[in-house]
Amino acid sequence: MPIRTFEEMRAHVAGRPPVAVAVAGGDEPNVMASIVAALEGGLIASAAISGNPQAILANVPDALRERIRTLPADTPAAAAAAAVAEVRAGRAGLLIKGGVDSTSYLRAVLDHTSGIRGEGVLSNLTLAEMPSLPRLIGATDNGILPLPTLEQKRAILRNAAPLFRSLGLAQTRVAAIAATEKISDKQPATVDAAALTKESREGAFPGMIVDGPFGYDVAISPEAAKTKGFADSPVAGQADLILFPNIESANATAKAWKFHGQAKTGSVILGAAAPMLLNSRSDGVERRILGMVIALCILSDRERA
């Protein structure tokens, strides 16, 4: 049966061995609260955390200190590099952004000699559980690529495939979003969506069905899909993943889910040698924990491959 909620996701990963993580910048209490909760909840086995050792350990209960290893670092760049080095050396299977800025974090990841970049592109995916939908729904890319090209959109879809496969979906329904369902050279997003749809029908994205261009309403509402003449689409009205044409629309939609849709959300960066978390500073402990759960699902899929 497909996984439809975060609770089901947590049950799914409960049987796998906890992962060792590396945290870039653990000087902030909110970051450490999520690490402590993950340790206590059995999601992670241990954590290597860069930053000020005294500040880090001040937020760790005595009973958990033996599972924490500090990596002294005086600057955000040094903290990011130290955490990335843990993943590169195989000592950690998940990289987490802590109290460092995003630029330093991503620069360390993408470094040609010491980073953990993959062969394609990095892309961010937010997964949401909302009262208004009977399934989990994803949005991508809402954090890395400002205006993805057609080739980058192909890579974004390939990045996302393992996550949805781990959720038990035989075919992930992907809606390629645009402002209209009509294909027009004046709106490149519609042209890209049509190209991806054609490629999907030819088998370019195993485990996925891509269709579009669709407006957001057609992607998620069966009624809108029927009204606009897309009742026969295998994706319209029932999308599992929404592929956005630019970072602004994706980012705004994912945040609307959080703040207006009463959504539980978690986010993960895909495309590196290991899953990565790039939490916003406004994210509380729950969203950080849900990001870890998503990452564990991806790791479970890798282990089965």
Image (cartoon, grey):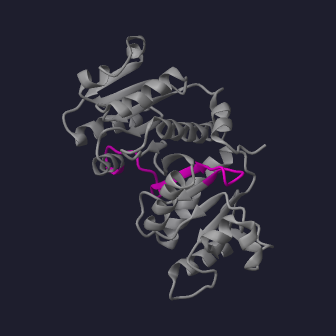
Assess whether residue 228 is covered by the magenta stretch.
Answer: no
Q: Over which residues does the magenta segment extend?
A: 110-137
Q: Which image quadrant for residue 91?
A: top left
* Residue under the point 69% across and 59% down: 206
Residue furthest to the top in view is 63
- The picture places residue 137, in percent across and down from the top left corner, at 63, 54
* Quadrant assignment for the N terminus: top right
Q: Which image quadrant for residue 116?
A: top left
Q: Would you say the magenta stretch is mainly helix, strand or loop? A: loop
Q: Which image quadrant for residue 173?
A: bottom right
- The picture places residue 76, in percent across and down from the top left corner, at 24, 41
Task: Say whether residue 137 is left or right of residue 232.
Answer: left
**Of residues 272 and 14, which is closer to you in this image?**
14
User: Is residue 202 visible in the rendered structure shown here?
Assistant: no
Task: Say whether residue 65 is left or right of residue 204.
Answer: left
- The picture places residue 204, in percent across and down from the top left corner, at 66, 66
**Of residues 52 and 301, which is closer to you in this image?**
52
User: Is residue 187 visible in the rendered structure shown here?
Assistant: yes
* Residue under the point 45% across and 43% down: 276
* Residue under the point 68% across and 61% down: 239
Q: Is residue 207 above or below residue 198?
A: above
